[in-house]
Structures are given as structure tokens and as C-alpha cells.
Image (cartoon, rainbow, N blue to C red):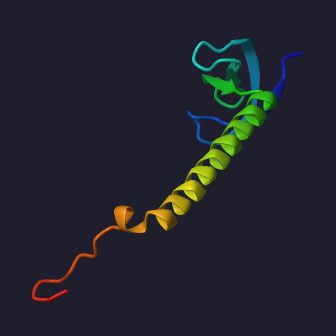
Amino acid sequence: MAPRRRDFCPNCKRYEFSTVIDTRPSKAVDGAIQRRRICEGCNYKWNTIEIPLQKYNQLGADIEAASMNYQKLLDRLAIVRQLFGEIFAIPQQTKKGDPG
């Protein structure tokens, strides 16, 4: 029996049971699965792309690593600004007519 679940049908705009009628590897997203579904309410067919949990976990790890590297960069920049403050100081903008 084909897998069935409630999905939002893009045609009848309701949550209806849909049945998977075809499954294949996605060409658009590496490691993802493309499924062809049919709405049991109006018989409309559409595609969904499902990304395996393993891919989500890897993406989360990549984002966390990038965030840590970004924080290290900010910390090092703060140290450089402390050491060489006047070189990296941003001049204060003054209002018109303000002497300073």
C-alpha cells in the first residue's frame, strides 16, 4: 500500500489525505527525495521534496560551526581595536553648525 498522509492540497486549498504515487531521488537538492502525490479529495497531482533528517542535522552543525567562527572573528576584532584603537576608530559625525 502506498504511503498516505494529510497534506495541504495546492489545488483545493484544504488538508486532505494524499497518496504517494512516485518516489525518486531529487535532482534539485542533493540527498533529498522527490515524491509525486495525489490528493484524494480532488485528484490533483503535485510534487514534494523531502530532506532526510540526517541532512537537517548536518546543516545545523554547519551553521553552528560558522557561527562559532564568526564569534571568534568578532572577539579577535575587539582585541585588535583595544590594541590599535585610534587606527580603527570611526570618526564621529557632527551635526551642521556643531563645532566638534
Q: Quadrant of residue 92?
A: bottom left
Asked whether, in this view, residue 6 is left or right of residue 9, the answer is right
Q: Residue at x 65, y 15 (%)?
A: 26
- Is residue 4 or residue 57 the one in the foreground? 57
Q: Position of residue 47 (x, y in %)?
A: 62, 22
What residue do we see at 74% from left, 34% from top? 56
Is residue 100 shown left or right of residue 10?
left
Front one among 61 and 37:
61
Give percent across and percent down for residue 73: 57, 50
Farthest-out residue, left: 97
The residue lying at 59 percent from left, 49 percent from top is 70
In this rendering, the answer to whether 21 lies above or below 97 is above
Identify the residue at image location x=11%, y=83%. Answer: 96
Q: Which x, y percent locates residue 91?
A: 28, 71
Q: Using the image as rendered, state which of residue 5 and residue 40 is in the foreground.
A: 5
Question: Quick one: quadrant of the C terminus?
Answer: bottom left
Q: Quadrant of residue 28?
A: top right
Q: Quadrant of the N terminus?
A: top right
The residue closer to the viewer here, 16 or 23, is: 23
